[in-house]
Image (tube, rainbow, N blue to C red):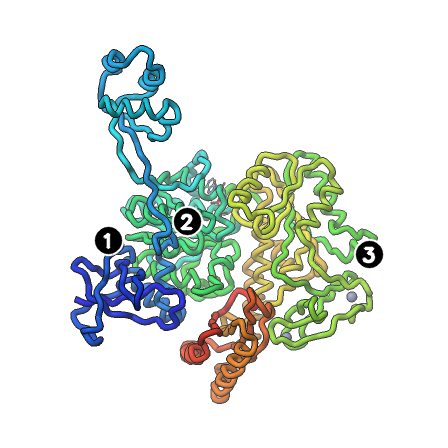
Amino acid sequence: MFAEVIVDIKTSQVDKVFDYFALENTKVGHRVMVPFGNRTIEGYVIGLKETTAYPIEKVKKISRILDEEPLILPEMLELSDYMIKNNHLKRVDTLRLFLPSGIRKEKVKPLLKEYVYVLDFEKDEARKKLRANSKKQLEMLDYIEPNNSYLKSDLNKKFGSLAVDKFVEMGFFEVKTERVLRNPQTKQKEDKTVELNDAQKDILEKVKEPATHLIFGVTGSGKTEIYMHSIKRCLDEGKNAIMLVPEIGLTPQVVSLFKARFGSIVAILHSGLSMGERFDEWQRIYSGEARIVVGARSAIFAPLKNIGIIIIDEEHDDSYRSESNPRFYTHDIAKFRAHYNNCPLVLGSATPNIDTYYRAKNGEYRLHTLLKRANNKEMPKVEVVDMRQEMLAGNNNMFSRRLQMDLNDCIKANNQAMLFCNRRGFASYMICKSCGWVAKCDDCDATLVYHKEDDLLKCHFCSRRYKTITNCPKCDSKYIKMGVLGTERVADELKKLFPGVKVLRMDFDTTQNKSSHANILEEFANTKPCILVGTQMIAKGHDFPNVTLVGIVDADMSLHYSDFRSAERTFDLLTQVAGRAGRAEKIGKIVLQTYMPKHYVYRFMANYDYKSFFEREINVREVSKFPPFAYIVRVLFSGENLEDVQVATAHALNEFNLLCEDNKDILYCRAMKSPVSKIQNKYRYQILLRLTNFGFTNLIDKVYNICDKYQKQGVSVFVEINPNNLS
Ligand code: ADP
Ligand code: ZN
Ligand code: ZN
């Protein structure tokens, strides 16, 4: 018997299958060690066969099998095939996704601990056998209970190892070594089971169907309760469940909610775990001990068998798209696994991805709508404040008079406020503070981005450049503003305005420690009054009953991000942020500061009118031929040698241009320096293509073929389809 083996080497340019003589017990999916050149390296068995096309004298033998049972399930091997084809990935890159990094190369070992088991004996009898002056032993005898077990190291610490050894010798204790699972720490939370209302019950019934469902429901409408009831139903049927949440939405609150309801059968997978914790959680899922996986994007690859439901919460979130190799879109993988397991896939959001809602409206997905909050409370009122008026009235502060007053009231009432300040991306835009005019590209209607190093405004979409200006072309005002408003400045300003009031800050800089995220939230939960300032990190999933005010310091910031999805993203983000206020008994309010108060995003957002926003947005996309009416394909070239990268880009562009000549399905094709022109010493160039939906299937393979040709030592070429951003 021969085994087809994929060897796990990082530098492998080719995705080659090698044939080896199989050992007796070799199964498909096994991890093995194989001789390779003059080394022995790790590999994966992806097939078994009777014959080989290699010269038989050159075929070597598998050295050993690393695990008793194959770690890569048959389902995952099929998924690997799918991803190779669909995402143009290398086999080894897909297989690596399926295993925790600690398992490969045996970086992490199972954690073993010694336990003492107290055998069955009479304490009084035992006491007689001990000497009267052996104080520690007598104390230990009082402490222990027959038929119980204790961690040996604990007893050693309390009573000394001599005493413990003595008890072993006397036959009171038996020592056993056992594997312990590293358990990610969580605080336990009281579970309150609620009875679903009629709207929720109705949806719960409908999402049984093995299809793709979209639950579109305002924040607080009780989606999470539907998820948990569906999962419960799955468990009762003997099946298992995966529930995905955005990375930053995976708060301790969500985790403890699930643990409180379902207990130890919940496994958690996210990037904050240590390698050992991840390894053990993975093992618990693989062995079937854990039956519910709650995790961020990569949890979609969990080795869970017999899946009864897959849920993607906040399905519109950008983090579901992997932006570095291996690139994939979580929804595609989830669809594959749902189909394989013949189970429902449930997407949920208050602000669905435009593409998702479009499919749901067209009947490709089943649409279920929740119009009201579960507790029947009104959505908090959104007040849009015109920052141009503030300036005219002589207020140059970053906070409007409205926001200052509301903050004051909030603090006086001993409540809490959240101030949101989105500093997304690396660059700033140019805006007139008097009239709200924003510098835009003449060709693309995209906001221009200021590049400090060459003092130019650039369009990230077509790479056209513009000189910076000092006077507004519309109203001639010289109050042209540039630069971003960071969380740090907002927090400083607050401390000045409200001395003595606790101000907390949560952003990338303040959450570098493993537990800092949880600590900040915990401190916020326990402090009144208090103001929490943060980036989009504070937008998701948090449920603080005392938050009565949410301030959005500069709503326009993400709107001006140069991208066809910036309106969509702004709507999502602001809706999410607004959803933090007035969740419980107290009435909430949102103050939204903008220089463009009439913009349709704000108009619809202030009324929580996603549907109208969707209609408006989908029309724009249709007319301008953007997704879902076309595909954007970015081909990214990067490498350490600038000339190599430029040459590869130029040659590839030639080929693309040839392709364009006789093909109307290519709507756009240009090459340019990437907006972030260098990352980690690698120069970046890109070719942007826009393809019609009709032409996509046909053309994408041609695109891949061209890219493979220029993928060589020193230059890497990646294809991204409808990427999150074009930096
Ligand atoms: P979403 O996920 O849509 O934001 P949740 O499921 O988290 O909403 O529900 C929001 C709040 O309403 C939670 O505190 C939850 O416990 C409560 N809730 C949900 N469903 C019900 C219900 N049927 N009856 C009472 N309270 C409910
Ligand atoms: Zn442009
Ligand atoms: Zn102006």
Alpha carbon of mark 3 to alpha carbon of mark 2: how far?
56 Å
Which residue lies at the image location 55% right of the left edge and 64% below the top edge? 680
Most foreground residue, 96 or 303:
96
Q: Earlier in the sequence, mark 3 or mark 2?
A: 2
In this figure, which residue is indicated by the disc labeled 2? 275
Residue 635, image x, y percentages:
50, 74
Of the residues tagged 3 and 1, which is closer to the observer?
A: 1
Give the residue type that dot 2 points to: Met
| Residue count near mark 2 (Cα–Cα under 10 Å), binned few <14, some 14–19, many ≥20 | some
Query: Residues at badges 2 and 1 in contact (C-beta under 8 Å)?
Result: no
Q: Nearer the viewer, residue 428 or 163?
A: 163
Mark 3 = which residue? 392
Left or right: where 112 falls relative to 494 = left
Q: Is 5 above or below relative to 374?
A: below
Give how far across and how far down residue 213 sits, in percent: 40, 57
Q: Is residue 253 above or below residue 391?
A: above
Left or right of 413, for residue 671: left
Report the residue marked by disc 1: 69
Q: Is residue 519 visible?
A: yes
- Residue 663: give its label: none
Mark 2 or mark 1: which comes first in sequence? 1
In space, the residues marked 2 and 1 are separated at their CA atoms by 22 Å
Q: Position of residue 510 (x, y in %)?
A: 60, 47
- Amino acid at circle 1: Glu
Residue 494: image location, x then y, percent: 72, 44
Query: What residue lies at 65% left-to-right and 35% top-to-bottom?
Result: 529
- Mark 1: which secondary structure? loop
Q: Residue at x 77, y 58 (%)?
A: 388
Mark 3 and mark 1 lie on one chain; the one further toward the N terminus is 1
Using the rendered image of the protein, determine whether residue 584 is visible from the camera's viewpoint.
no
Q: Element at badge 2? A: helix
